[in-house]
Image (spheres, rainbow, N blue to C red):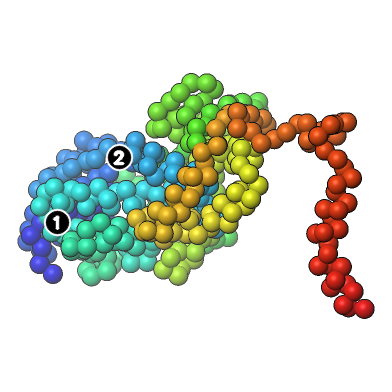
Amino acid sequence: MNANKIVLAYSGGLDTSVILKWLAEEYQCPVVAYAADVGQHEDWDAVRAKGLATGAEKVIISDLREEFVCDYIFPAFRANAIYEGSYLLGTSLARPLIAKEQVRIAEQEGADAVSHGATGKGNDQVRFELTYLALNPKLQIIAPWRIWTLNSRTKLMEFAEKHGIPVPTTKKSPYSSDENLLHISFEGGILEDPWNEPEESMFKLSVSPENAPNQPTYIEMDFEQGSPVAIDGKRLSPVELLSKLNKLGGENGIGRLDMVENRFVGIKSRGVYETPGGTILRAAHRDLETITLDREVLRLRDSLVPEYSKLIYNGFWFSPERLLLQQIMDESQKPVNGTVRLKLYKGNCIPVGRKSANSLYSEAHATFEADQVYNQADAGGFIRLNAMRLQIQALNRK
């Protein structure tokens, strides 16, 4: 392929620093280094300086935090998205946003190619490239890990040393990690053996449940049409709200997950996640739905959650089917307004109270005391009609 200008998704780490230099040499064209701020803790001045020193024509850093929470995290949580029963999709939700901004920058800068540092074994290559192709199929896609010969960390280090690319001299974490406002993930190192327990020193966002406070923390969360808007009566911006939940969850040892998941490419992968705020948010949201959603609406919506979640995990955020499902999910959320009270204690997030002006819960109907609204004798006919097919089967067996 020939390229006139390339926009690289750049983090400033070893891999993308080597890729930046490699692209400039291999394609003999300007390379724009683009970094996305989705809430990771990063020295952006250092990232900019390193990108320019490594040969980037320009370094662009986009603050995507508010868009990430408003347009990606909250819509997914309105749908109760969860992959394989456990994973709250922290990385999966960030990738389409990062790639969307990369396409915008490529168009703005007059670039005809985009590049990323994802390997050929993982999910991220799919998520990046499905987004590129969905939004601007005319852009060339360069995936160095699938075409170059630098196929080991040793070779990357040798290339960096040869080209004067600064490499940290401090001991590097043995884990591959991805961090954003929703979570932090860990893979590799001792985690590649699924029998090994994660080391406590690895965790960054949460204390261990054993070391969490001995007294519970109570909070109240307000929702409007399925999205959180306030904590303890104080309205917060989406980024402020999720950051507050991350702090509260982390302090109480909430949100740790250790699982083996099925990657889209067909490989099983062991990952450890910290998602403190997201864990609280999902528990509160589901609890509020128990009093605000009709039984059959809830059942139908829940039947769609696995497919919706799989689409996000596999990189189809911009697909017509995900957009259609989002409309269904959001329509179901119109009555999900109210407040949930939660008890946070040593790794547990326990809903202990809920109220809503849209509540479908009727104490008059549910009471065990005498009532004037329900005739218990009606239950007999209800049971007999529901048993009709069972009775007929039983008679046929005789």
Q: Is residue 340 visible?
A: no
Front residue (pair 347, 18):
347
Mark nearest the camera among 1 and 2 is 2
Q: Earlier in the sequence, mark 1 or mark 2?
A: 1
Relative to 248, 364 lies left or right: right
Residue 346 screen position, x and y as percent: 63, 35
In the image, what residue type sits under mark 2?
A: Leu
Location of mark 1 (residue): 6
- 6 or 394: which is nearer to us? 394
Please state if 398 lies on the left or on the right of 359 as rendered.
Answer: right
Instruction: Return the x and y of residue 216 as percentages of the image width and height.
Output: 64, 27
Residue with the most extreme right position: 398
Are there few (<14), some (14-19), or many (20+) residues within 10 Å of tag 1? many
Q: Is residue 369 above or below residue 166?
A: above
- In-image side of 298 versus 230 (left or right): right
The residue depicted at 60 percent of the width and 32 percent of the height is: 358
Q: Which mark is residue 64?
A: 2
Residue toward you, 181 or 68: 68
What residue lies at 38% left-to-right and 38% top-to-bottom?
70
Q: Quadrant of the N terminus?
A: bottom left
Q: CA distance from mark 1 to mark 2?
A: 21 Å
Location of residue 259 (image quadrant): bottom right
